[in-house]
Amino acid sequence: MDYNTKFTPHTWPDHPEQATMEGKNKVVGFWIFLACEVVLFASLFATYLALKNKGPAGMEFSTQELFELPLAFAMTMLLLTSSLTSVYAIYHMRNFNFKAMQTWLAITLLLGLGFLCLEIYEFYHYVHLGFTFSQSAFSTAFYTLVGTHGAHVTLGLIWFTTLMIRNAKRGLNLYNAPKFFVAALYWHFIDVVWVFIFTVVYLMGVIG
């Protein structure tokens, strides 16, 4: 299909992100990129588990004393809800409803921003307690794992914001539809990573 084709809701493809060869290539290439990201986070999880609760004698911080499940749960709910709102955004993209897609993406941004604010507060609280990045091997592994995820969330928010601003007057077409789709795919990926972080770091840390 031609990028310059004028579409209506009735002529818009069911899967516009794969309606062109370039769109298909973007989706396939992004899946390859996500496979590399899986390797990155797998190594960070392995490092964290190996160094968990390890610190200088007399200066150890245990996960049971440090982590607060209510805060981690609130962060989880914000991020999971943002994943749902991004699904709604892609649903409206596939139905050629640009305004509704932009609205749901804006809600996704707000939820993601709320998550980041809570994460910054969490880090500030831990640093205030003396649990700094260089305090121990455990703290370094924790901040590296959770901080890397936070950096990915920040990148996702910047990505969504850039797409929304650049295409605000253009509307939907077969050129930008794959861009919105892979951005949402990326957002789902960092949401899944957070579910593992919540389970391995916080839930197992407090209960186990």
Image (cartoon, rainbow, N blue to C red):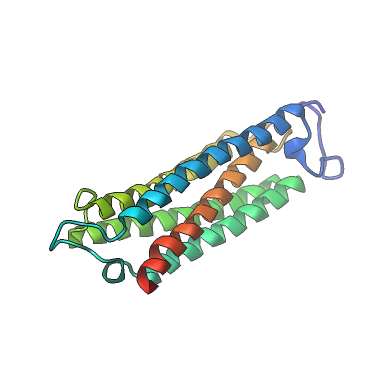
In the displayed orientation, state which residue is furthest to the front. Answer: 50
Q: Is residue 116 above or below residue 204?
A: above
- Can you see residue 117? yes
Q: Is residue 30 above or below residue 65?
A: above
| Image quarter of the N terminus | top right
Q: Is residue 17 above or below residue 2?
A: below
Which quarter of the figure has residue 65?
bottom left
Which quarter of the figure has residue 24?
top right
- Measuring 26% from the left and 54% from the top, which residue is drawn there? 139
In the displayed orientation, state which residue is furthest to the right. Answer: 10
| Image quarter of the C terminus | bottom left
Q: Image check: 51 left or right of 178? A: left
Q: Image check: 199 left or right of 48? A: right
Whole-percent x and y of residue 94? 75, 46
- Can you see residue 170? no
Whole-percent x and y of residue 181? 65, 42
Number of labels in the image equals 0
Whole-percent x and y of residue 151? 41, 44
Q: Nearer the viewer, residue 147 or 81?
A: 147
Whole-percent x and y of residue 150? 41, 49
Q: Nearer the viewer, residue 156 or 67?
A: 67
